[in-house]
Amino acid sequence: MQSKATGYGVHQWKNGDRYEGEWHSCLKHGQGTDFFANGDQFSGTYVHGKPEGAGQYKWKNGSIYIGQFQNGMKQGKGKWKKRFNEQNCN
């Protein structure tokens, strides 16, 4: 019988990305936070491995998006706060 990671856990990938949160059948599922090697961070709800529902994405430069996600993408209404004096959003 193969193990299927379920419950709370932390996983770090070889590229430096790290996830801390809930898992179900080896997929991010429930509340969690992704810490990306480039300095960005996502915190929120995951469903079957992808952001779904309420979440917050913080860029390394200090910009933040707070809002809804669907199938891993920003969806619907949200708030985007650009870093002070930032002219372009990346």
Image: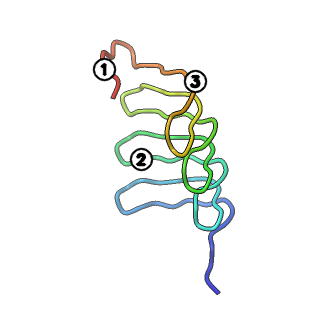
Instruction: Find residue 9 and report its horizontal and vertical position in percent.
Output: 61, 61
Instruction: Find residue 52 and report its horizontal and vertical position in percent.
Output: 60, 43
Q: Which mark is residue 36?
A: 2
Residue 28's image quarter?
A: bottom right
The foreground one among 59 and 26 is 26
* Residue sitting farthest toward the left: 87
For the residue marked with disc 1, what is the amino acid?
Asn
Which residue is at 62% across, 78% downward?
3
Instruction: Find residue 73 and report its horizontal and vertical position in percent.
Output: 49, 39
Residue on which the image places disc 1: 88
For the residue marked with disc 3, what is the amino acid?
Lys
Q: Is residue 2 above or below residue 39?
A: below
Q: Is residue 43 above or below residue 90?
A: below
**Image depth: mark 2 or mark 1 in front:** 1
Which residue is at 56% across, 37% downward?
69
Gap in Å between the C-alphas at discs 1 and 3? 20 Å
**Is 83 left, or right, of 71 in this rendering?**
left
Residue on which the image places disc 3: 77
For the residue marked with disc 2, what is the amino acid?
Phe
**Is 2 left, or right, of 38 in this rendering?**
right
